Image (spheres, rainbow, N blue to C red):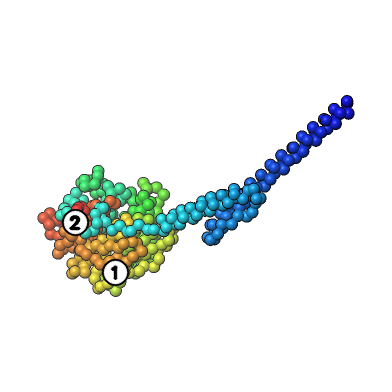
Amino acid sequence: MLRSVTWRAWCILLLAGLGACFTDQGDATTATDSATTSSGAASDTTVTASGASETTGSGGSSGSTGAATTGDATASTTATNATTTAATTTTATTTEDPLTPPTLCELELDAFTLEEPVALDELNTSERDSDPFFAGDGLTLYFATNLANGADVFTATRAGPGALFGSPQLADALGVNSPQDDTKVQLLDGGLTLLLSSARDGGEGGFDIWLGARADADAPFQELVNAGPSINSPDNEIDPHASADGLRLYFAGEYNGELTIYSSSRPDARSEFSPRALLPNIETGNFRSTHPIVSDDERVLIYTSARDGSDDLWLAHRDSVDDDFGPSAPLPVVNTEAFEGEAALSPDGCELIFASDRADPGANGWDLYYTRVIPR
């Protein structure tokens, strides 16, 4: 009886063990099929991405063939969609928007004109007033006035665009005035960088362009540095105007006894400017050209030129900074038979101040005038 029970127990244990073995073997087969299916899908994705014309599974048991084929199709579709998306993205990235036309005060150049100029009586003196420059937000103006000991830089402020300027004062806070003539000034980099036209000692000769830097916009410039022989010569270099980023410089320099417009560039603000070169398409004749200024995007150039016999204000434009300026045309409204030049453009491009020796009632011989850019 005991032997019979023992035999039965052994039989039960044996049958249970065999069942477990068969069960484990089935699980292992399923896992193998699953791995094979994943391998097939990965292989098919690679083939599809590389542009193969056929989809080929990497194998698997006969019981898992259907699953592998389904995975292959899904992977192929996913890879194709990804490739299409990538191509679409690439196309969108390489497509450039068409260039917008150059503007002044957000007006296209064929759609603007200027108001009739008015004298800035609050700034003008009985001496020569010239070389204006808008600083910062356009509420501070720097300009030059001839005094008994030569020209010095003055400054005046106003409450807002179009408002009257307050009484002018010597720009002692800049620290730029010297015993010699100091005229056109420009501030960059929030007032930390200075360009100046000056006849002070220590230059290359005559008027030179000088550079200054300071760490505090409220402190005077302690020491100015000559721009060097790549810019300056034994003759005169005047009217410096740099691009907003300080990497391109426009100025007037003497060449064969005539003042002409030059440009120079540098890769960064710490590097020296390249040797000067005549500005193409501007200096193409034997006439005097001075006082170049450019809009913030450098696509609009306003300058003074005697190409028609008397000094007037002219405008040229280009599509991008990599292009040469196109043909020039006189500014509307402001030019007369007298001298008009030395323009300054407000930061928003909507206001223009210039110098003129026109014989207006009350004029002092060489005064500053104000006008605004308006729709035509």
- Depth check, front residue: 203 or 10: 10
Q: Residue at x 30, y 63 (%)?
A: 318
- Depth check, front residue: 245 or 146: 245
Q: Residue at x 50, y 54 (%)?
A: 80
Q: Which residue is drawn at 51% across and 51% down?
A: 78
Q: Quadrant of residue 272?
A: bottom left
- Name the residue type under label 2: Thr
Where residue 42 appears, as percent x and y from the top left, is: 59, 52
- Name the residue type under label 1: Asn
- Depth check, front residue: 222 or 162: 162
Q: How many labels does the image show?
A: 2
Name the residue carrying label 2: 113
Disc assigned to residue 342: none
Q: Is residue 164 visible?
A: yes
Side of 137 where 2 appears, left or right: right
Q: Residue at x 28, y 51 (%)?
A: 348
Name the residue carrying label 1: 281
Real-space Cα separation, disc 2 to disc 1, in angstroms: 24 Å
Where residue 68 appears, as percent x and y from the top left, is: 60, 50
Q: Which of marks 2 and 1 is nearer the N terminus?
A: 2
Q: In which quarter of the image is residue 231?
A: bottom left
The quadrant in which the C terminus is found is bottom left
Side of 280 where 306 appears, left or right: left
Q: Quadrant of residue 115?
A: bottom left
